[in-house]
Each structure stands twice: as structure tokens, then as C-alpha cells.
Image: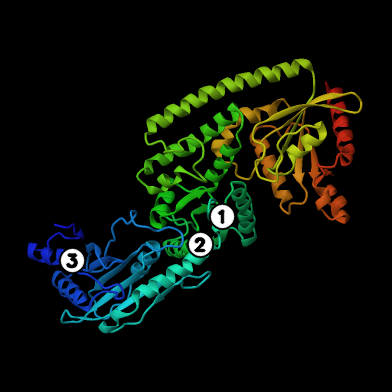
Amino acid sequence: MKKIFGKTEGIKASMLKEIEALYYERTPADAVILPETAEKMAKISKAVKRQIALLINRNGNTDFVIVGTNQQIMIPDLSGYRGSSGRLRGLRCVHTHLKINEPLSEDDITDLALLRLDLMCALSISQNGDFDGFFYSYIIPGEDLKEPYYISKKLKPQDLFNDCTGLINSIENQLSRKSKSSRHLENKEKAILINVSDSPLYEAEKSLDELKALSQTAGVVIVDEIIQRRKKPDPKFLMGKGKINQLSIKALNKGASILIFDTELTPSQINAISNVLEIKVIDRTQLILDIFASRAQTREGKIQVALAQQKYLLPRLIIQKSSAFSRLAGGIGGRGPGETKLETDRRHARDRINRLEKELKKVQKNRKKQRAKRERSNIPVISIVGYTNSGKSTLLNTLTKSHVLSEDKLFATLDPTSRRLRFPREREVIITDTVGFIKDLPKELKVAFRATLEELESADILLHVVDLSNPHAKNHIDSVNKILEELNLLHTPQVLALNKKDLVNPEIITALEKKFKGFAISARKRESLDCLYNILDKKLDELKNLL
């Protein structure tokens, strides 16, 4: 006996045989369903007072027979069926409605969109239990449509012989063209960025701009950006079930393979969203962790990142059964520990955290010894701090004529670098470049990188580098100072270097220097750094006089 899915309790054995027999009904390729089959479904549905559904593949065979309640059906897991970019599921759903002339419901449209079905069809049953017409719906490929699906009016039984195959092929051809247009990006993740908050629009846009920069640093191609303003986030889906439905069709139209949320999602939210959408879902924290994992070069850096990732993943192991995390096994959000599979055993995860913490303590001891050695040498220490991608490593390279990795990417430098710098007056200092700061730095990274950030404690001067060309420079300064305050380092003397002055209108540079109480430089141009040498030299003299 073939399996009948759904609510079969209380149905007589003879009726179950009739329901099972629906598996053997063949449907011609060009028909939605045969009128004779629709008639049988109507009679059975009327008799058992429950909805009956068939999932029919493109060969005309019935893959699933489902019994629902009197109001809805529950479609079983279809993860084994295709649903890739530019492709529909390869199944159409034909089911009965018990109310006379009842059109497609909101649940029907949701299933059509979220499951990427070829077609959704509802059979209308007359008062006598006869099949007397049908409604159908399909996805309309296209961008930014208010309603990206077509819903028919009630049609007559003879209209079931429409060109069903031609319609489905036409839809897939349009989706495929969109997919082929980005074929050169085939090996890259294509993402939709999502911001859900009650912040003013300009704040949301600013935050999304930073998420875009983070995504591009991680090698992701951005195919769309969404801002939804909500006074209160939906506790389950963050953005509401209706928007999730629209998001599914948008992801299909755009060929997106990943959704990146501009906030930290709870484990249950990641579980709920990814289960409904069947697409990889990550949040801002995991994206940053991924970037750090790809940037770590030294053993110390790798330990710190691994520890941060494990602490982030530990509370999320409770949703192990979800495909949300099985889909994170590769690509963005899946680098670092557990690439082949996420830790399925929480005890093993805790053991790994304990082991990494012990290794990190050894690192801290070694760093303390190095700091103590520097302090005994009485060589002043200048630590470069600043928002990520402000030009810290470029400045270090220009000052010391070294070749530390510097790129126009966020977190290009992860591992701390120290160099000796000789001043014109034969004064020698040690200058260090540290990991860039960012707004709302994930707490897991703050804890894991404590050993690195402790380097700042031995600094005599903090050289705070700011990207003057960035319209959000003031916010970046505030974010850096907030982290320094958390590290109890605001008492350390600061010199504010306003970098990238060559990208700023010369007429406003003086005003900006007064506004931020700093001085403008161009880290790439050595001749622009004379004032920096002078100010640092003067600051070191002041500190020497205080001793």
C-alpha cells in the first residue's frame, strides 16, 4: 500500500483504498488534471469532509496523495525535489476546497511561493459533491512586482486542458534567463541583504551600507537590499510571515542563494526562516565571524576566531535538526570550525571551547612577557586604532616602509603587527597595528580577541585613524571610543589622524579638522605625514616630562 500523507485518522478502510487509488491516476502533460480524476477527488473529499490533494510531477505521475482538514492541507517535506536557482520544484499541487466557489486561500499562495511549485490549483465542489470548476495560480517571474503571482478567476472543468506544459516552461525559461545573466558569478554566493528595525530610514540605510561592505569583503554578490520598518520585530520570523512569503519569490527571481540579516538573529529565528524559505540564512554576527575566519593568518588569530565561532554556535546547536545549519556547511557563514559538519554534540563543543580557552591563555602569557620586555627597554609604544578600513595598515606601511597587508576591504588586518619607527630626532618607538573596530562588534569576538586588544593597554599613545572621506566618520569615531571605554582605555592619550584627505574637498578640510579636533593626512603620501611626526614627537615629550 502506498503511503497516504496527512490526516487519515477516522477514515474507513474502504475509503482509504479509494484515496490510495488516486496514485494510479495518470495526468496528460498539457492538462492541469483530468476532469475524471478531479471528479473522483471531489466525491471523496465530500464523503470524508476533508480536503484531498495530489502532487503531480511533470511526467503526469502522482508523487504524493495528501488528506487535509476541512480547511487546509499540509504538504510534506519536498527537500528531495529540485528547487535550485532558476528552477521550479517540478510538482504541481491540485487539491479540493469544500466550500462552494471557494477561491485559492492565502495558505495556498504561500505554499506556491515558498515551495516554488509549478502550479497551485483548487478544485471547486458543488453542493451535490460534483466537480464544477477550478482556480489556479502560478509565479510571475519579474522584479519589484507588487503581486509576483497570477491568480485566476473560477474556470470551467473543460479548461483543465490548457497548455500546462507550455506555461511551466515559459515561467522557467524566464527564471533561467535571469540565472544565466549572472553565470559569471556562478561560484559566488548571491545575497539579499535585509534590515528590519524601527530606526529612521537614514539610519537603516547607513547600517545596510555597512552590511553591504561586509558582504563584499566576504566575497558575496549583492542582488537586492530590503529595509522593513517595524515597531516591534516578529518574534518568530523577525519581519512577519507575509514578508517572508514575498521574500521567497524575490529570492527566486533574483537567483539569491543566501539571506543576510542586519542584526543578530536568535537560534529559533534562523531555524524558522530557513525552514520556511529553504535557503541559507545568516546574520551580521556570523558574517563578521566568517570574515575573521578567512583573514586569520597566525596560530593566535585562528585560535581566537575558532573560539568566537564555537561560542556563537553553541546555543544554536539546539536547532540541529534544522536544515538552516546543515546548509551552512560551506560558503559564506561556514568557514572555520566544523566546515564539513556543524558540531552535533554540545558536549564536544564545550570541550573544544575549553581547549581553545586554555590555548588562548598561553597566548596571553606570551604576550605579557613580550610587553614586559618592551617596558624594560623603555621604548615608547604607539598603537594604531580605528574603524575598520580607515587606512591603519597603509599608515603603518608608509611610516615604517614595511609591507603589511593593506586592502580596501573591511578587516584586511586581523593579526596584530608591530614595527620599529625612528623619528627625525633619533627617537625610536614601537608602533603596532591592531584589528579594526566596527559598530556592535560581536560579543564573542570581544571576548576572544581580548588577548590582542590587551596590546593596547601597554600603549603610551593611541593613534586613532579616521576615514575623513566617509560620510559616517563621526559615528565611526564614537564607535571606536565606545570600545576603548569598554576596555578602560579612554584615559590613554589619543592623537586623531583624519586620513584620506586627498578624497575630500580641500575647501572643507580645515573646518573638519576643527570639528573633529584632529589633523588631516593621506596615509599613502609620506610627504603629508610631517605634521603627524611632529605631533607624536611633541606628545611623547609631554609624557616624558610627566614621568
Q: Position of residue 302 (x, y in %)?
A: 56, 31
Residue situated in front as seen by the camera: 338 or 177? 177
Q: Label 1: few (<14), some or many (≥20) within 10 Å? A: few
Q: Position of residue 222 (x, y in %)?
A: 58, 56
Q: Residue at x 60, y 44 (%)?
A: 440
Q: Which of pointers 3 and 1 lies earlier in the amino acid sequence? A: 3
Q: Which of pointers 2 and 1 lies earlier in the amino acid sequence? A: 2
From the image, tell me which residue sits under label 1. Answer: 185
From the image, tell me which residue sits under label 2. Answer: 179
Residue 438 lies left or right of residue 1; in this view the side is right
> In the rendered structure, are the residues bearing label 2 and label 3 in contact, judged by CB atoms less than 8 Å apart?
no
Q: Position of residue 251 (x, y in %)?
A: 48, 61
Q: Label 2: few (<14), some or many (≥20) within 10 Å? A: many
Q: Position of residue 484 (x, y in %)?
A: 68, 36
Which amino acid type corresponds to the residue marked 3 in the rendered image? Tyr
Q: Residue at x 58, y 42 (%)?
A: 291
